Amino acid sequence: MNQPISVAVSFPPLQEVDFAAFGAIESVPVSRIQKLTATYLTRNWVTIPHVTHHDEADISELEVLRKRVSEDGGVKVTPLAFQIKALAQTLKAFPYFNASLDASGQNLILKHYFHIGVAVDTPKGLLVAVIRDCDSKSVQVLAAEVAAVSERARTKGLPMNDMQGGCMTISALGGIGGTAFTPIINAPEVAILGVTKAQWKPLRGKDDGIDWRLMLPLDLSYDHRVINGADAARFLLHFAQLLKRPEDLLCA
Ligand code: CAO
C-alpha cells in the first residue's frame, strides 16, 4: 500500500448572486444534519477513488416468498430485510469488502462482525442507522429493526451509538423509484450498495420464449484503492444469486 498522499485543492469562491433580481425567493436555513452530511460526503467524494458497478438481481421468487413471510409472521417484511441478510452473507464470502483502511493507509482492518448501515431519509436530512450482527438475525427481526430505527430516526433522531460501527451501507431508494444511481461511500467503509425500484422485464426464456422476471437494479460503489473491478463484479453477482435463491436467506 502506498503512503497516504495529501492533496491541497483550492476552488474559486462561489459568487454572490442576487436571486431576487430574477423572481420571488425565500431563504430557508440548512439543518445541522444537512451541514454535517455535506462535510462528510464532500470529504468522502474527494478523497476516495470511487467506481460504481451496476448489475441486476432476479427477485421474482423472492417477492412471492416475501409476501408469504409478511402474511405469516405479522411483521411487514420489505425487500430491504432480504437485501441486508444477503449483504451480510456476501460480506462473509468477500472479507476485503468487510474492511477499512487504517488511518495510516498501511493496513487493512478486516472485520469479523457484520453490521449493516441503512441510509434513512428523514425530514431533517440523511441519517445512517447501523443494524448489528445481521448475519445472525432472521429477515423478520431485521425488518422489525429497520422499521423501528427508521421511525426513531425520523421522529427523534438517533444517538451516535446507533450510527457507528457499520461495515457497509445500503442506500435503498426502491420504495421511491429510479433505475440506477452512484452512491457515495460512507467512510471508513470501502463500499456502499445502492438499490432502486424493481421492474418486470421480458427476458429470453426456454425455446426463445419470453419469460417475465422481476429485476432489482443494484449499484455498488467501491473504493478502488482496496477493491478491484473484477472482485466488485463477483461480489454483486454473489449477492444477486443469494436473492435469486431466497429460501436460503430464511435461515437465521
Ligand atoms: N422495488 C420495488 N418496491 C420496493 C423496493 C424495490 N427495490 N423496495 C421497497 N419497495 C416497496 C416496499 O415493498 C413497500 O411497498 P408496500 O408499502 O406496497 O409494501 C414500499 O416500497 C415502501 O418501502 P419503504 O421505503 O417504506 O421501506 P424500505 O424497507 O424499502 O426502506 C428505508 C426503508 C428507511 C431505507 C426507506 O424508507 C428510506 O428512507 N429510503 C431512502 C434512503 C435514502 O435516502 N437513500 C439515499 C441516500 S444518498 O445516497
Image: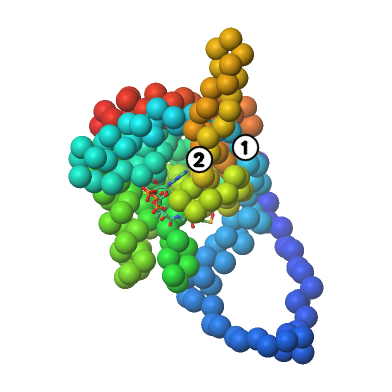
Q: Are marks 1 and 2 in contact (CB under 8 Å)?
A: no
Judge whether residue 114 can be spotted in this image: no
Q: Is residue 126 left or right of residue 106?
A: left
Residue at image x 33%, y 36%? 66
Residue at image x 57%, y 32%? 201
Residue at image x 60%, y 45%? 180
Residue at image x 32%, y 25%? 247
Q: For mark 1, what is the residue?
A: 53
Q: Residue 157 falls in which quadrant of the image? A: bottom left
| Element under disc 2 | loop
> Within 8 Å of ligand 1, the CB of disc 2?
yes
Tell me where residue 236 appears, x and y as whole percent.
Answer: 53, 31
Residue pushed farthest top? 207
104 or 213, which lies in front? 213
Kind of residue sitting beneath label 2: Ala
Q: Quadrant of the N terminus?
A: top right
Q: Quadrant of the C terminus?
A: top left
The nearer-to-camera label among 1 and 2 is 2
| Element under disc 1 | strand
Tell me where residue 159 appears, x and y as whole percent.
Answer: 32, 65
Mark 1 surroundings: few (<14), some (14-19) or many (≥20) residues within 10 A: some
Q: For mark 2, what is the residue?
A: 198
117 or 43, which lies in front? 117
Q: Is residue 13 left or right of residue 231?
A: right
Tell me where residue 184 appears, x and y as whole percent.
Answer: 58, 52
